[in-house]
Image (cartoon, rainbow, N blue to C red):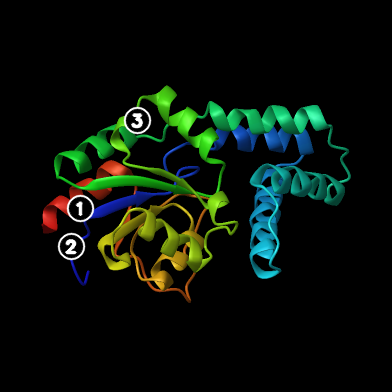
């Protein structure tokens, strides 16, 4: 690290919140073990298409459109109510192991903590309030306000400006390789949370930390301070 980070900026879905139940529901809906992965890849791809084509569709609309595309690819007709029921789960997902303890540990070390998500701010804020984690977060920031999606560099720059901090004083924490790539190239330090269905992009800068949980990250940071 070039300098000690002052603020921990966390991705939410897949990093703090466990997407396993959505994965099961999408696989069941699409009647395929690869249904979720197909949908998620299309979902991210068309968020990035919006970034590149100077247009903006809200996150929920892209989620539904790409679920219909995944259904077409697997020859399944997707009902609107089924899609709404799956997206409603975003408000009720459980925390990954070690999140509560890790945030507490980071807070005790004196770090500022915030969240940066591609999802709607209200959805994330409501979930954080239900888990009781909202008190740890100085801000919950959504890319919807920039009308771009991570890993667009403008999103990370906007977040740093909102938080009134230099990019190189921020440690972006995510379980998504594209998020790590975007934050690194924007000038942030990064921490990658390893998960079995995600991977780093080999052509992007390596993360400053690689860990298994938020608690693991907090311990690694404390060890080098």
Disc nearest the viewer among 3 and 1: 3
Instruction: Name the N-terminal-most of marks 3 and 2.
Output: 2
Q: Is residue 202 left or right of residue 166?
A: right
User: What is the CA distance from the residue labelled 1 to the residue labelled 2?
Assistant: 13 Å
Q: Mark 2 points at which residue?
A: 4
Instruction: Name the N-terminal-most of marks 1 and 2.
Output: 2
Q: Mark 1 points at which residue?
A: 220
Instruction: Name the N-terminal-most of marks 3 and 1.
Output: 3
Considering every residue shown, the one lying at the far bottom of the view is: 203
Where residue 68 sits in the image (x, y, percent)? Answer: 81, 45
Q: Within 10 Å of the Cα at label 2, are there few (<14), some (14-19), or many (20+) other Cα atoms?
A: some
Name which residue lies at 37% across and 42% down: 139
Where residue 210 sits in the image (x, y, percent)? Answer: 32, 58
Disc number placed over residue 93 in the picture, else none: none
Q: Is residue 74 left or right of residue 199?
A: right
Where residue 218 sits in the image (x, y, percent)? Answer: 22, 47
Q: Which of 62 and 82 is in front in this view?
A: 62
Q: Give the answer, above or below, for where 132 lies relative to 155.
A: above
Q: Within 10 Å of the Cα at label 3, are there few (<14), some (14-19), or many (20+) other Cα atoms?
A: some
Q: Name the residue under label 3.
A: 133
Q: In this view, does 87 lie to the left or right of 128?
A: right
Disc nearest the viewer among 1 and 2: 2
Name the image quarter holding residue 42.
bottom right
User: What is the CA distance from the residue labelled 3 to the residue labelled 1?
Assistant: 22 Å
Residue 193 appears in the picture as rendered: no
Where residue 185 sits in the image (x, y, percent)? Answer: 42, 73
Name which residue lies at 34% across and 45% down: 114
Q: Give the answer, above or below, for where 148 lies relative to 130.
A: below
Q: Within 10 Å of the Cα at label 1, are there few (<14), some (14-19), or many (20+) other Cα atoms?
A: some
Name the image quarter holding residue 78.
top right
Residue 135 appears in the picture as rendered: yes
């Amino acid at each position: 690290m070039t300098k000690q980070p002052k603020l921990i900026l966390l991705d939410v879905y897949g990093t703090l919140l466990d997407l396993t139940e959505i994965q099961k529901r999408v696989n069941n809906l699409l009647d395929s073990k690869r249904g979720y992965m197909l949908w998620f890849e299309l979902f991210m791809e068309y968020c990035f298409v919006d970034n590149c084509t100077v247009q903006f569709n809200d996150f929920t609309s892209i989620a539904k459109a790409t679920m219909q595309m995944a259904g077409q690819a697997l020859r399944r007709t997707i009902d609107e109510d089924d899609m709404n029921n799956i997206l409603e789960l975003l408000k009720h997902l459980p925390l990954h192991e070690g999140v509560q303890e890790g945030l507490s540990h980071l807070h005790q070390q004196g770090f500022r903590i915030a969240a940066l998500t591609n999802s709607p701010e209200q959805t994330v804020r409501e979930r954080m309030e239900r888990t009781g984690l909202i008190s740890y977060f100085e801000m919950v920031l959504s890319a919807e306000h920039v009308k771009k999606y991570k890993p667009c560099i403008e999103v990370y720059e906007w977040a740093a400006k909102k938080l009134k901090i230099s990019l190189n004083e921020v440690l972006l924490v995510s379980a998504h390789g594209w998020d790590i790539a975007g934050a690194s190239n924007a000038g942030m330090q990064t921490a990658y949370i390893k998960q079995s269905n995600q991977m780093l992009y080999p052509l992007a800068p390596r993360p400053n930390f690689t860990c298994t949980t938020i608690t693991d990250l907090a311990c690694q940071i404390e060890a080098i301070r």
